[in-house]
Image (tube, coloured by chain):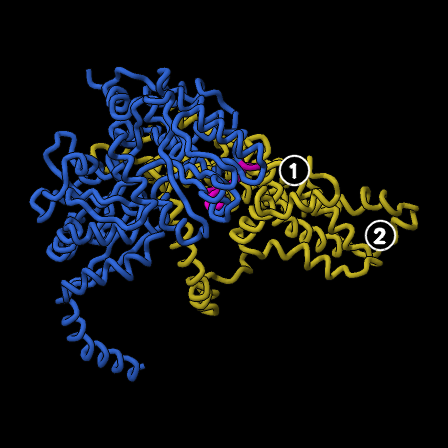
Chain colours: A yellow, B blue
Amino acid sequence: MTDVPPTDALAIKRPFRWHILVFLAPAFLVYTAIMILPLVETLRLSLYNLVDGKTVFVGLNNFITLFSDPRLAANFWNALWNNLIFFVIHMLVQNPIGVALAAMLSVPKLRFATFYRTAIFVPTLLSFVIVGFIWKLILSPIWGIAPGMMDWVGLKWMFAPWLGKPESALITVSLISVWQYVGIPMMLIYAALLNIPDEVLEAAECDGITGWSQFWKIKLPLILPSIGIISILTFVGNFNAFDLVYTVQGALAGPDGSTDILGTLLYRTFFGFQNQMGDRSMGATIATVMFLIILAGVSLYLFVIQRRIRRYQF
Amino acid sequence: MTRLLKGMFFATTMFAPAGAALAQDASLTIESWRNDDLSIWQEKLIPAFEAKNPGIKVTFAPMAPTEYNSAVNAKLEAGTAGDLITCRPFDLSLAMFQKGQLAPLNDLDGIKNFSDTAKSAWTTDDGKTTFCVPMASVIHGFIYNKKAFEELKVEVPKTEDEFFALLDKIKADGNYIPLAMGTKDQWEAATMGYYNIGPNDWKGEEGRKALIAGTQKLTDADWVEPYKTLAKWKPYLGDGFEAQTYPDSQNLFTLGRAAIYPAGSWEIAPFKAQADFEMGAFPPPVKKAGDTCYISDHNDIGIGLNAKGKNPEAAKKFLAWVASPEFATLYANSLPGFFSLNSTAVKMEDPLAQEFVSWRQNCKPTIRPSAAIVGRGQPNLDLEMWRVSANVINGSETPEQAAAETQKGLDSWYKPAK
């Protein structure tokens, strides 16, 4: 212990490193101003409400109203349920397809691999407004090309105004979103697959594990951490989703609220719609609940699932 | 750096007086949801006003209709709204007035040019204070393709039976979609459907007032009947009407692919610009020949004064001009289909607009039932009616369920005065 030099001697040798603070400041300030403050303000607003024209602290009353008022509660549970379906469709369709595409792209003999990779990734870069309107047009029973194209292959009878039917609207919107974002899991998995050292694969081949069983037994366990990251990104993205539903189905998220997810419910409640006035406190309350849902999901992943995923060091 | 600073000082000292000189002129901003009318305001209405009132500059600043109310409310609260606020009828504007955001206009020059009925949409419940200058009303009915009617040798229907017989005939012919309407955007189902044909069933003002008084309910036969009629429209709508949007319907009709368009008179001007065939119009058909007809003649648009505006004097001048017969003539002719509420008779040149207005002579006018008093609470009755009307046409709800749902929503907050 006596060997340790006195701390003040260290301080003299190392002057306070101001440049660290200076370099951190812009990011810290910008992030605080546009992310942390609004978040704190939203959480605060959910505890206040207008009473006789004045903003008053009401404790958890807004939350009690949200869950006890029959209309608000019905809207909220409907939106949460739809959001869950939206998420499940992404998990069942987008991520497996992403993994499959990545696995195919990483086959060394595949021709035009770069072209496919780019083509599949491009929709992700498009604005949701463009994606929404393109798909709305494609699927339009009046002007769309979907009915005509299905007619060519004799499937006209299967065509329906999917976006206008309560039973199919949510699935259709989810699949549009899958189409747009499937490039992200593909890219992440593709990168993870490329990271697997050749020695591991060669060793597997020496042991007689090739083809499908190589994918299931060697590659998949090695990319599991990436799949975990993708799942959590999908979860956060889906529970914050709003834009695509808004452009395709409008703020009412019709027909009959069947595509209403938490984001559109929040929008209508906070900003109002047509003759319905905006209610900022209730909007902030819904935003807070969304925040808590996402926080719970992410925590579950970080503290329960991520710790059990085995990581391999090469 | 110092040079830049010097330049800035120079600029401020040089240009500051110019800014002060400009400030003597008043500039007014009109907040509105009528983005379709932007060019008419910019090219016809505002120049006419500015020519007479040098020194006042007017800007028309419209935004998306569905976002208008929340946006303008937020602006009013933050104090950034323009001096002139376009008023939705009845409860929405009344709420603004009660919050002190709109100024009373009882002593405005020209407010006497309007009848009490015209002012009713923008007057307090006790009838004492008016807070917006009435601008126009819109009338509901059906616009039809005259060429199609001639080809099929059919006549304008007078009764509901004739109406459905006509639809059958158009459908059997197969060349035209009988009715151009979709349910995707929901509001047409209520606005062009329920509010359009309903007054014949609930007997216009009689039923509307009884609903407010609580002597009738939305579940009464008179209020369920229009839903039943709407449900019968389903087979006559185009393929995939569930995903057909409002612009889709407009285009189907103006391209000549549909024969009849359930309409509001505001469609006249855009339809005139788009369609290359003659159009006619007929009022909602009555149940039996000889029944009194009722039409929805809805006070739709007014204009008020921001109580905390920056240029109240200039804004009042503008409002007085809006209340003048000169504006009424100019407006009604630039925007046929928006009918002036001014007591001075306005001469309109558009034959289709004249057709709509002519119904006022025989039919009893009423306003949309969800607009006044029963439209004040949560859930909003208007939005509820959008939703259930679309459901009824889609077949996902029966007329009785639809009526029961709206009545339940109304019961949850509305207690009629006994």
Of the 4 image quadrants, the one containing the N terminus of chain B is bottom left
> Tag 2: residue type?
Leu
Which residue position is annotated with label 1? A159
Query: Percent from the top left, x then y, of residue A159?
Result: 65, 37
Give the answer, above or below, for where A129 lies relative to B210.
Answer: below
At horizontal 53% and vertical 51% (from top left) the residue drawn is A128
Looking at the rendering, the stretch of residues picked out in magenta corresponds to B238-250
Label 1, label 2: how many angstroms apart (C-alpha)? Answer: 46 Å
- Residue found at x 44% / y 26%: B162
Most foreground residue, B214 or A279 = B214
Q: Is residue A259 left or right of residue B189?
A: right
Q: Secondary structure at mark 1?
A: loop
What residue is drawn where x is 83% and y is 52%?
A200
Q: Position of residue A176 (x, y in %)?
A: 60, 44
Q: What type of secondary structure mainly makes up the magenta span? A: helix
Front in this rendered view, residue B77 or B87: B87
The nearer-to-camera label among 1 and 2 is: 1
Relative vertical location of residue B384 with respect to residue A284 in this rendering, above or below: above
Magenta region includes residue B240: yes
